[in-house]
Image (cartoon, coloured by chain):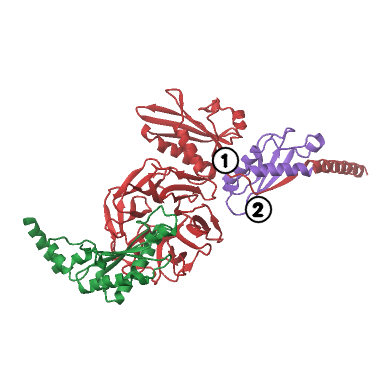
Chain colours: A purple, B green, C red
Amino acid sequence: MDKYKVLIQRKIQQNVNKQLCGTSPVELQFEIDLMPTGELIGNPKMLKSSGIPVCDESVERAIFQSQPLPVPTDTDLFSKFKNLKLNFHPNEKI
Amino acid sequence: MKKSLLLASLLSLFLVGCSSTPINDASKPTGPSVSNDEKDLDLASLRDPNNILSKRSIYFDYDKDVVKAEYKDLVAAHAKYVSIHPKAKMTLTGNTDDRGSREYNVSLGQRRSVSVKKSMNVLGAQDTQIETVSFGEERADTNCKDDACYAKDRRVDISYEKE
Amino acid sequence: MRKYNLHMSQIFKAFISLVLFSFISFNAFAIETIEISGGGTKQINIAVMPYKEIALDKTNSRMHQIIAADLYRSGFFKPLDVDGLMNKPSILSEINYSEMNAIEAQVMTLGQVEINNNRMKVNWFLVDINKKTILTTMEFSGPVAQYRAIAHKISDTIYEKLTGIPGVFSTKISYISKNKGRYSLNVADADGFNVQSVVGSPQPLISARWSPDGTKFAYVSFEKKKPIIYIQSLVTGQRTVVANFKGNNSSPSWSPDGRRLAIVLTYNANSQIYLIDPDGSNLKPLIQSAHIDTEPVWSPDGKFIYFTSDRGGRPQIYKVSSSGGEPQRVSFEGNQNLNPNISPDGKMLAYVMQDEGRFRVVLHDLQTGQITKITDGPFDEAPKFSPNGHVILYAHKINGSGELSTVSIDGVVRQSFNIHADDIREPAWGPFVK
């Protein structure tokens, strides 16, 4: 379970372009729905904006870019991943 | 002939108007007084290859503006020359190698020309007859790879207004 | 009694519903949350399609190459290779989104050109590949001969839409070139094209600085065998002497309102900083010392002047109030620091640091004190911020000859200009033109 969380986290993180998010700490939150293939259903839903429109757009692009997300093939396990909340802190050191 | 008379009268007007070296004006009057200058300024001695006055360059150690002992006689000769020729106008032009920024090198070259001037002041040369300027790195060899090459650029050149 | 019983069963039903509801809710609201910190990418993937010329029904790559080069040089974009694609859409209905997804394009720009009587009309689109939406529509027209200017306007529009920062692709740069012993002050487009000579001289030219309104240059010429400061109008071509005092006259720097210049004079002593009006009047010393003080640069709010001084031994960067006073040292790392330039928002300095034998460009965050080395040297000089503060233009020497380069302020994208292979030095970046 955690293994998939880490895989998803890594894949999306690699695609996040924080250049457009300024230098102060900002926080964003998106909600996504996934197909068993790891593809998005519809667009990511922004729950919390960074306050910087180009940053929000950049993080949203990163989510799209990360398709297909590495989700479990087992149906029971997948049910925990078909709806995810993603919290972003682009300016935090990893 | 007419033209030179006109110039001569303009020149005398100019000389009447300015009794001391103007600070703001860099333009130099031209005129037919060459033969007077030859005598007054003893230009021949400046040109004579056997005369130390024909030597015009003083070289400096890296990062230093101290005039080295080996140039003492050269400095003294030129200082004496301006002292005994009150109409002589000397320019000391400082130079640097091409490392660093251009404007800072203008200042560094200037520090060297000022250092030479001070050595001459001590020997009686007046500031009114000397202008210190700098070309910075603008005359430097841009292909230097070692200090033997850079050393040639660390230099003050002595020149005179009328020669 | 009945009422009470009914009430009880209602309550019971409600209770069951509540329990069931909670049970379901508990599952429904147990959304996994994933924390994602930092970011691994630095650029937006963009597919820049060649435009299609309507009348000739052929695709022409000139403008798309200019746009792709502009966007790449900014450091924010990675233009994708579209040359190998079979499908080169020029209208929205031609876009093959799965093909774009396959090359990992995040955004795409495409359009059409109509040419009539030497005038071109350009219709351009910026498209979000993921959401399949149009981000911007652009329409530009102008003489065909100005196709580069139109391409730069498209680059500006794309850049601003996606980064929120004003683009500098339509601005100008200047530099001094040396060719066969002759010097020339030149103005060019920000990408190095359309070079025009403003001043020519048999003796060196240095320190050319754009006036804040972009209509004049202050520069230093050695044509009289000593450095003298001139101001020349780009509009009329006329020039005037600003300073020709005894000794050196150099290092001019315009105040942000264009009404004063900080300059460096020597008389018969060391370099010192003065303030003067552009017409050469109202000369006033800024600070006085026995040391070298030079390379003054005004802060954008006009309150401070940063400069280079060797009062501490080796050249370092200092700062002083523009009304004079006690200078404060600003640079502390490396062996020596010189040639300061300040960002348009006043928050960063760019200067040249010498350490380990190399001269390289560094960025100094004035708020945090952090220093970042953004070039490698060994002989880098004259860093200048772009008017949007995101790119540094600088010169560097290779085998005795100078070249210009730009580097994005994160140090990621570096590009060199090979302008006719001349010996190039002293770059400066022109302001935004209204």
Q: Is residue C126 shown above or below C303? A: above
Tell me the number on the disc at residue C44: 1
**SS of the residue under disc 2:** loop
Nearer the observer, C320 or A54: C320
| Disc 2 residue type (three-letter) | Lys
Nearer the observer, C248 or C54: C248
Nearer the observer, C26 or C48: C48
Q: Residues within 10 Å of mark 2 (few under 14, many from 20)?
A: few
In this view of the protein, can residue B156 be seen by the observer?
A: yes
Chain of the residue under label 1: C
**SS of the residue under disc 1:** strand
Q: Is residue C2 shown above or below C212? A: above
Q: Position of residue C77 (x, y in %)?
A: 54, 41
Nearer the observer, C337 or A93: C337
**C3 sits left or right of C295 in the view:** right
**B93 sits left or right of C396 in the view:** left
Q: Which residue is mark 2?
A: A93
Q: Is residue C77 shown above or below B53? A: above
Chain of the residue under label 2: A
In the rendered view of the protein, which quadrant contains the N terminus of chain C? top right
Q: Residues within 10 Å of mark 1 (few under 14, many from 20)?
A: many
